[in-house]
Image (cartoon, helix red, strand yellow):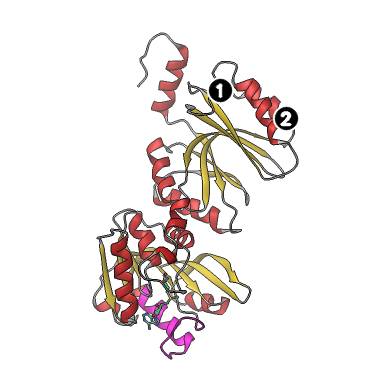
Amino acid sequence: MFRLGGDKNNFKKFFKQQKLVSMKYLFELSKEHKTLPTAEVLSCLKAEDILYNVIESNEDVLVIESKNMTDYKIKRLADRLSMTFFVDKLLFSSPPSIDEIRRHASKHRIEEDGSIEIRCNNRSKTVDSQKIIRELGEIYSRDRTVDLTKPDLTLRVSVTKLRVYVGLKKAEINRSQFEERKVQYRPFFSPISLHPRLARTLVNLSMIKRDEILLDPFCGTGGILIEAGLIGAETIGGDIDDRMIEGCRQNLDHYRLRDYRLFCCDIGDIIKYVGQVDAVVTDLPYGKSTTTKGEDIKQLYRRAFKNISMMLKRGGRAVIGLSNRDMMVLGCQCFSLVEYHVFRVHRSLTRYFAVYQN
Ligand SMILES: C[S@@+](CC[C@H](N)C(=O)[O-])C[C@H]1O[C@@H](n2cnc3c(N)ncnc32)[C@H](O)[C@@H]1O
């Protein structure tokens, strides 16, 4: 809270809080995939009801402008994102030269009080990180102290080939959690499982909100259900293989997830147990290392699309892992295709992740 004394700065801050002034935010993307990190952020912004305009988008960063991105909403975003490193409040961006950085920094002051540290993520060799830190340190430490151990504020500098972005850190994404949940650390393990970071991204692409219902009708070991459960969704899983259902149950219990239901059944039967769901996220068998129980893959996909569209609410999203482009087109007979992402698993295996809307 700010006391409304005669201080001009306090008036300005109070006015900003009340008027919901538009601010620019920077998402420092992991760059581990060409399209998924940006798509994940955009879906999460929508899922968290954040109004935004995209100002700039490339493989390194996403810059948005928003009027309702409160600290609370930033925290909620950071808690669910997986392919982003940091969320910053953008101070400025400039061409990657020391003169330009100096010119912009002297025009953009930091309004927040407190000591500061400066961190630089340099993805380009165009400017030297130490030079940038020295230059910014000189400008921004004029009216505050530098503290490298417990600073109140962290100024983050992202250097890319074409631009430099400078902002105040608002949140850091806990990426190590995904490594800690890797399939080999779970009670039940199978090579068919997705990496938890990818599973989380797929869940996010579905725009599921906390307390909504997410279905994975080909749940296998439960990789998708774990990530959905951890962001607060109620989950339902189905699989034709009873060993998978038992293993999936062990995995969900291992992460202390309670709000789930599992059914050992064929995709054509799950509708008998489940009402309407808010989102579907699933990775269909691809006929190589996973089983289709002898069924022709095209036939299985056809049945999957039909049954998923019957269970998914109108306007809801289905995020589906598929074996090839033709199968993705097949899905368009039941849904409209919003976007798709091509993911190379290894040299001889490419997956397509299609985002459909019902
Ligand atoms: C690619 S795997 C899913 C892997 C899962 N995402 C994970 O993290 O472990 C596909 C799953 O579909 C199941 N399956 C195959 N045919 C099915 C059918 N007709 N109905 C339901 N499940 C089926 C398989 O048993 C397998 O577990």
Q: Residue at x 39, y 48 (%)?
A: 48
Say which residue label 1 marks: 146
> Which amino acid does the dot numbered 2 rest on?
Glu
Splitting the image into four quadrants, where does ligand 1 fall?
bottom left
Give the label on residue 276, or none: none
Q: Where is residue 193 in the image (x, y as percent from the top left)?
A: 45, 70
Residue 311 visible, this orientation = no
The location of residue 234, given as percent across then percent down, is 29, 60
Q: Could you tell me which quadrant the C terminus lies in?
A: bottom left
Q: In the rendered image of this protein, does residue 281 appear above or below residue 31?
A: below
The quarter of the rendered structure image containing the N terminus is: top left
> Label 2: how many residues lie within 10 Å, few (<14), some (14-19) or many (20+)?
few
Which residues make up the magenta segment?
287-308
**Is any atom of residue 25 visible in this view?**
yes
Q: Is mark 1 on a helix, strand or loop?
A: loop
Q: What residue type is labelled 1?
A: Val
Q: Nearer the viewer, residue 295 or 226?
A: 226
Locate residue 157, reporting x and y percent.
Answer: 61, 36
Residue closest to the eye, 67 or 104: 104
For label 2, the residue is 100
